[in-house]
Image: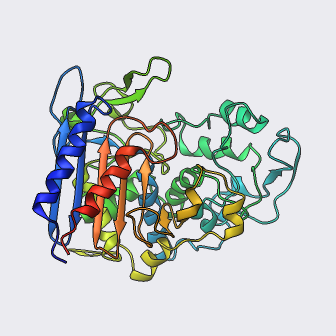
Amino acid sequence: MTGFSAPRLGRMADTLQAYVDRGEVPGLVALIARGDTVHVVAAGVQDRDSGVAMARDSLFRIASMTKPIAAAAAMILVEDGKLRLDEPVDRLLPELANRRVLRTLGSEIDDTVPADRPITLRDLLTFRCGFGAVMARPGAYPIQKAMSDAGFAPGPSPADFPPDEWIARFARLPLIQQPGTSWLYHTGSDILGVLIARAAQTPFDAFLAERIFAPLGMVDTGFSVPADKIGRLTTSYMLDRRSGNIVVYDQAEGGRWSRPPVFASGGGGLVSTVDDYLAFSRMMLNLGRYEGGRILSRPTVELMTTDQLTPAQKAVSPFYPGFWDANGWGFGMSVTTARQGYLTVGSYGWDGGMGSTARNDPTEGLTCILLTQRMMRGPAPEAIYTDMWQLAYQALDD
């Protein structure tokens, strides 16, 4: 593979800069890589008030781009023989034994039936554990209020209670669906973090640091930003729907990610850079291999990046309109199952709700990463994401 067309790479810089010039995002860092060729665009500012320029090593809250990393950590433990894909999680998470399930989505939370079977590790990895985001307006169902009261309301920030309390609170809620029957977004990855910590007998963040970040040289990735790097952390912004303006969600200095979290979220807690995430993406694209050896085996990566859901499960698993037309779900990430745009069948990766996306395309040997600091407006890909993917593919030089 010969890499990219130099003239066509210029289109990427121009198109992404236009998003900054229009005020749609304060700043961004984009990266595409193919073979030994890596092209990076940095545009805009880290913070609108200070005007500090965005740089290649700027730090971003990558939110749900954490999920594939958590899935990889779980599979390391499977390969270590400490976890098994189809073993009930009750052995290490006894809080989740003997689950109750809502009779219907609209039932009161005490109107339940017994779970047909226990939750397994495979259920957590594929989001078929029976619990997750309810894709309906807030307050539409009693379970949504119960989730909010327990501290599980949907939102970009990790929980404020430690892992043992988190799993205990979760265990007091009924499941929404029977395990294994449907896909429900997000919560499986947070449960996964607690399970990994107990299986490894070490905190979740420490396990990631030892088994993934250190071997891959991901020196800037973690659940918080130390004081000597805080100047590289971008301010997080969100769209105020009433005014239409972009407003601050989380500052760098003194913000949530400036200190270690109480709960290290496997579903969305990490901060990283484009080059750190490239190291993880390249390991996956190389089927588990990196320059110093292996993180995962080839069969494990192939399993992780294969669609695990049946048509029947997709049919009862609402997300955003059209998602299942071209996507399936592997372990902690989506898998492209039909070519509707530029992404080829077999591509995989995921987005971060705080403004980021990453995809690998094994057919083209391509990695595409875009980090911004403005939150997504919903679960569907932002226009800047789809433009980024198109810009990457149009620059291919063979």
Q: What percent of the width, then of the height, locates residue 208?
A: 38, 58
Residue 207 position (above or below residue 339): above
Residue 219 in view here: no
Count of numbered badges drawn on the protein: 0
Camera-side residue of 29 and 274: 29
Query: Which image quarter is the C terminus in?
Result: bottom left
Camera-side residue of 314 and 231: 314
Which residue is rendered at x = 36% and y = 23% of the image?
Answer: 248
Residue 323: quadrant of the picture: bottom right
Query: Which image quarter is the N terminus in?
Result: bottom left
**Residue 25 vs residue 58: left or right?**
right
Q: What percent of the width, then of the height, locates residue 283?
A: 30, 70
Farthest residue to the left: give it: 6
Residue 70 position (above or below residue 186): below
Q: What percent of the width, then of the height, locates residue 11?
A: 18, 51
**Residue 377 vs residue 91: left or right?**
left
